[in-house]
Image (cartoon, helix red, strand yellow):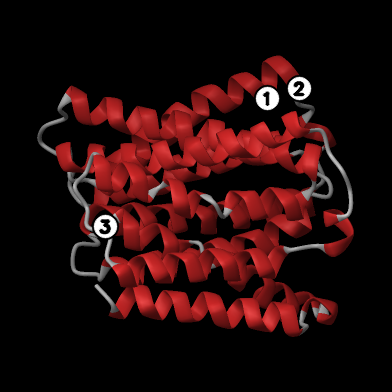
Amino acid sequence: MLDSWDPNLLAILSAVLIAIARVFYTAGLTKITPAISNCILALVSTAVALTAYLLQGGVPEWPIEGLLWFISAGVFGTFVGRFLFMVSIKLLGMARSTVIAQTVLIWSPVPAVVFLGERMTLAIAAGTIAIMCGSILLVLDKGEAKQKFHLRYYLVPFVMTMAFSLAHMSVKKGLLEIPSPALGMLTASLTAIFLTTGFVFLIEGVKWKALEKKPLMAIAIGTLLNGFASFSLWGAMKNGDLVQVVPLNRLSVLLVILFSWLFFRKQELINFRVVFGGCLAVLGAFVIVSGR
């Protein structure tokens, strides 16, 4: 379904959709907990993946090895990675958590080069570092940076980045066995549903009648956009190299700030540091796309 699209373009499209989705999350998360939002995301992602799978006519063979890789992607990325990111925000704050999350650009290429045989060129490495540094400048919060936290708290976002890097490799390995992004995303999302619903109902409990309609609608729209973003990213990972696709997808940090300013007019976000970080990230993306 997405084979005719350029992988780098799909990665950037995914970043755009993620950024718009997070604008809706901002409006909805004030009234709805992250755990419930993650559960809704898993449900919507499953619906998107199932629709895509049915439209493409299915897959004749489902090798068990491919399915296990897809399940692994659901465990490490959709469940563990997102959950630890939320825990990290609670322990360290949004700015520190997002800064550390950008280091996934360092860890993801390692298994891609070692286990998948992908080629890391000087241009791709330079572009990746530019996007990472630019993204860190975009989200750096001076007020939060002055706070001191216990060293063990930093283990949470560190493990989170490891989980996401393993998820990226699992997606690529699974797609080599079963070249169907729709089936892969469907399998990963079903795995996440099983884990997230168990977490929500057994740990938190849910009073659905107490949920407000407007925040719930905002979360629903955000998760739908995120579902399409995930499908685009899976398509990019199928035909592209992780060393290129993953860094381009991290441009979502820049786009989140842009869309937040456009929709909410948070003009205090636009200063020299943000402009410089944005230019650095865009330059990095250009280098990665043009310097194969």
Q: Secondary structure at mark 2?
A: helix
- Relative vertical location of residue 125 with respect to residue 69 in this rendering, above or below: below
Cα distance between the residues tagged 3 and 2? 39 Å
- Mark 2 surroundings within 10 Å by alpha-carbon count, few (fewer than 14), some (14 through 19), many (20 or more): few
Residue 25's disc is none
Label 2 sits on residue: 204
Circles 3 and 2 in contact, beta carbons < 8 Å: no
- Whole-percent x, y for residue 73 in the image: 39, 35
Cα distance between the residues tagged 2 and 1? 5 Å
Q: Earlier in the sequence, mark 1 or mark 3?
A: 1
Label 3 sits on residue: 241
What amino acid is found at the position of numbered circle 1 in the picture?
Answer: Val
- Mark 3 surroundings within 10 Å by alpha-carbon count, few (fewer than 14), some (14 through 19), many (20 or more): many
Query: What is the residue that sits farthest to the left in this orientation?
Result: 60
- Quarter holding the N terminus is bottom left
Q: Earlier in the sequence, mark 3 or mark 2?
A: 2
Q: Quadrant of residue 262?
A: bottom right
Q: Is residue 227 left or right of residue 19?
A: left
Give the total of numbered labels.
Answer: 3
| Residue at x 22%, y 53% (from the top left corner) | 118
Give 249 or 190, whichever is nearer the viewer: 249
Residue 200's disc is 1
**Residue 268, visible in the rendered structure:** yes
What amino acid is found at the position of numbered circle 2 in the picture?
Answer: Glu
| Residue at x 76%, y 33% (from the top left corner) | 151
| Residue at x 83%, y 55% (from the top left corner) | 145
Give 163 or 45, whichever is nearer the viewer: 163
Q: Nearer the viewer, mark 3 or mark 2?
A: 3
| Residue at x 70%, y 78% (from the top left corner) | 274
What amino acid is found at the position of numbered circle 3 in the picture?
Answer: Asp
- Quarter holding the C terminus is bottom left
- Whole-percent x, y for residue 131 in the image: 51, 69
